[in-house]
């Protein structure tokens, strides 16, 4: 009877150890996936801030350009300089807008996959492995 008890306790200890290892692996994989998602959202935040700055710069350049137009200085260097700055800031704004929209789409897709497939898949894999260990323990403890 004593050998059965020590054998059973050894098997339970082994089962607990295996469950802890599985949980550790799950947490590691979850952290990797979560950090990828965090990088995407950080990129969206960075581009959003840059976009707001570019809107202000473009608006400022537009106002300066319109001020030069009102002065009727269309043949001066000031006009060319204001026009060039307005065109450059507007192009930069449009490029940043495109980058921002692409980053939003990437983050949205990542979020859908993250919550719709990856996390449920990780949890199912963890559950399946734990069930296998329990079934293995149950079979070996009956024998």
Image (cartoon, grey):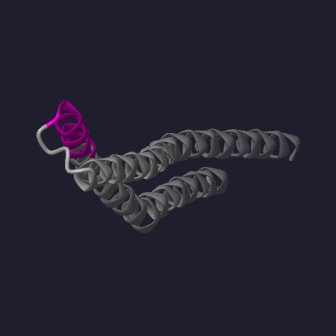
Nearer to us in this view, 29 or 47: 47
> Where does residue 45 sit, x and y in percent of width and height?
49, 49
Magenta residues (range): 76-89
The answer to whether residue 95 is left or right of residue 118 is left
The residue under the point 38% across, 63% down is: 108
> Where does residue 47 sit, x and y in percent of width and height?
41, 46
Q: How many marks?
A: 0
* Vertical relation: 122 (above or below) 78: below
The answer to whether residue 121 is left or right of residue 74 is right
- In the image, farthest residue toward the left: 75
Nearer to us in this view, 96 or 15: 96
Residue 30 covered by magenta stretch: no
Residue 78 covered by magenta stretch: yes
The residue under the point 52% across, 47% down is: 34
* Vertical relation: 101 (above or below) 58: below
Identify the image quadrant of residue 76. top left
Identify the image quadrant of residue 88. top left
Nearer to us in this view, 74 or 107: 74
* Vertical relation: 134 (above or below) 26: below
- In the image, farthest residue toward the front: 72
> Where does residue 22 sit, x and y in percent of width and height?
59, 44
The residue under the point 11% across, 39% down is: 75
Q: Is residue 99 visible?
A: no
> Where does residue 85 sit, x and y in percent of width and height?
25, 38
Nearer to us in this view, 118 or 44: 44
The residue under the point 25% across, 40% down is: 82
- In the image, farthest residue toward the top: 77
Q: Is residue 24 visible?
A: yes
- In the image, farthest residue toward the right: 2
Secondary structure that dominates the magenta span:
helix
């Amino acid at each position: 009877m004593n050998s059965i008890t020590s054998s059973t306790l050894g098997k339970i200890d082994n089962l607990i150890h295996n469950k802890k290892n599985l949980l550790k692996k799950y947490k590691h994989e979850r952290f990797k996936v979560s950090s990828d998602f965090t990088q995407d959202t950080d990129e969206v935040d960075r581009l959003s801030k840059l976009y707001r700055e570019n809107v202000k710069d473009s608006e400022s350049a537009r106002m300066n350009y319109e001020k030069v137009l009102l002065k009727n200085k269309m043949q001066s260097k000031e006009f060319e300089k204001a026009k060039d700055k307005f065109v450059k800031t507007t192009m930069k704004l449009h490029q940043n807008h495109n980058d921002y929209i692409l980053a939003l789409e990437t983050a949205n897709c990542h979020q859908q996959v993250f919550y719709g497939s990856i996390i449920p898949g990780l949890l199912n894999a963890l559950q399946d492995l734990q069930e296998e260990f329990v079934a293995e323990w149950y079979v070996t403890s009956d024998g």
